Image: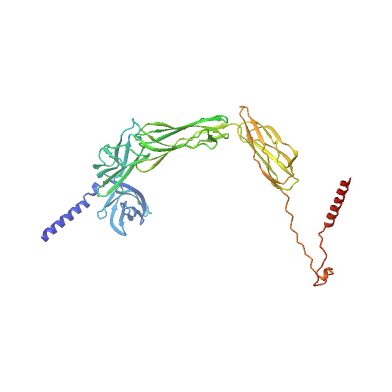
Amino acid sequence: MFRKALIVLLMVLCVLSVTASAYTLDDIEWKSTETKTLQWGHNFENGEAKDDSYDTYVIKAEDFSSDGFVSLSLSKDGQIKDIASLGLADSWEYRDEENGQDIKLFIKEIKTNVDQWTGNMEDPTVKVEVYRRGVPDFDIDIKTEKNEYDPRSPSNPKEVVTTITVKNKGYAKAEDVEVIVDPAGMELADGDLKTHITTLAKDETSEIIEVDFEVPHLWEETDLDIEVTVRAKDINGDIHEDSEKKEITVMPKAELILTKSIIEELYMDETAYVSVAVRNYGIYSMNSVTIKDTVLSSMELKDSVTLEKTVSFKPGETIEVFSYALKPIKPGKYTSPEAVATYTASNGKTYTYESEDPKIEINGPYITLSQKMDKTKVEPGTEVKVTVTTKNEGNRDASTRVSSTDFPEGSTFVSGDTSFDKVLGKGESGSYSYILKMNDEGTFKLSPATATFIDMESYKGEKISNMPEITVEIPEPKETSTSSSTSNPSNGDSSQPGTESNEEVVEPGFESIFAITALAGVYLAIRRRK
């Protein structure tokens, strides 16, 4: 029993040994990596320690002979692996069976620089070209009929026909080549997602591989990456892999197209008509779609209209959702807000669609009128200054007349201008001022000023100004401190302490009032006698 187990173990080891060394140096396809010139005793490194496919070797010029030979050593990990004496155009191949790395040195040039008189060499050099075992590398080409697929279009292909070719652009034959296709979630219509190629020689291109996918029906525009991975073995059994992607765009299976139309230019006295239409550009019904529109801030609705509706659409159906009229408020160039539709699809996501934002220009004058007072609180008899200002904030000239005809009760016009008459251009303004005397107490509103205007297009109108308030009142008297008299010998009072004074205190001025009253009584009695 033990003997049988030992035989099986030896057979396995033999198989592994044959697999690990299934090729000879004659089978290798070499790749030139670098060329270096060495002086006597100098060396250089070949390979990259961080690269798993290349171990680092040290090549050193150990010795030269005057008859044109050089002794080179090959070291790895600080240990000399081999030494060889080489002449011009000689090759030296070394195989590292343990690590699966192969290296070849080719002598391109030897300069012994022998002195004719002494026969000694002076600074001999050797130029060495280093080769490594070549490995396969792949150029993957992926083609589709189109870059964009639209399932809504009757003429659009229903399948994504994909063709793939693989070229071995490396330096060695590839074996057991696998071509693996990732369809980015698309359903396979024809072909295979995995193709096996036995071998692919250096510079060889594979036959065309065709794989077809069904064009997916998606709720939103999506970019999909068809990815192809090529995986193969080299002569040593090492795996080499490359990948490539091809992006295609798939349009949504259903989409709402909103159209908002409005006149591009109008005058202030004209009416703008707005229409919002929606089309279901798709192959699926869309139910309970909410559509909203917004009125431009420089315009107002002429009629009572609700600009929000919930509508359902069949595939390809077009509905006029809104139709309404607008009245201009102020001239200028504006961008109308977009109409917006929102829809919650069967996947639970909510999608938003917007119309274009049409541009509109409103023409005409726009007259503003305001008045202010230089004081807001005064005493009776005070004069105040009133300033009336008008401005044309539109884009057309207008003949403008402004006047102030009424004044608050309890006031008197003193001086100044009360009217203004001028053609105001775009951005121009004018003003006048007058003085009022405030006579009576109270709170008064300034009477409004009135402006009338007309332009060259016979567009006319009237504007009323604001009505600022003014308060007229007598200020309260300021409080003063008084000192009361006390019975104190020092202030001249003759009354003795403990006695009461019988003198009557008379308020200042009382005697005068009493005398006037008496005279008036005498005068009335005389008139009655007569």
Q: State the residue lying farthest toward the front.
A: 529
Query: How far across and down, in percent of the image, does residue 530 sit?
Result: 89, 45
**Quarter in which the N terminus is drawn:** bottom left
Left/right of residue 491 with respect to residue 403 in the rendered view? right
Q: Which of the 4 quarters of the picture holds residue 452?
A: top right
Query: Residue 198: x, y in percent?
Result: 23, 42
Counting labels gives 0
- Vertical placement of residue 31 versus 75, above or below: above
Q: Is residue 481 visible?
A: yes
Q: In this orientation, which residue lies closer to the viewer: 336 or 69?
A: 336
Q: Is residue 509 visible?
A: no
Near-viewer residue (10 or 29)? 10
Q: Is residue 303 left or right of residue 442?
A: left
Q: In the image as oriented, which residue stretches furthest toward the top? A: 457
Residue that extends furthest to the left in the rendered view of this protein: 1
Front position in the image: 331 or 153: 331
Question: Nearest the camera: 29 or 159?
Answer: 159
Residue 139 x/y as whole percent: 32, 41
- Which color scheme is applied? rainbow
Task: Report x, y in % for residue 310.
Answer: 41, 37
* Residue in view at x 28 percent, y 54 percent: 84
User: Quick check: 387 left or right of 19?
Assistant: right
Question: With respect to residue 303, does 28 lie above or below?
Answer: below
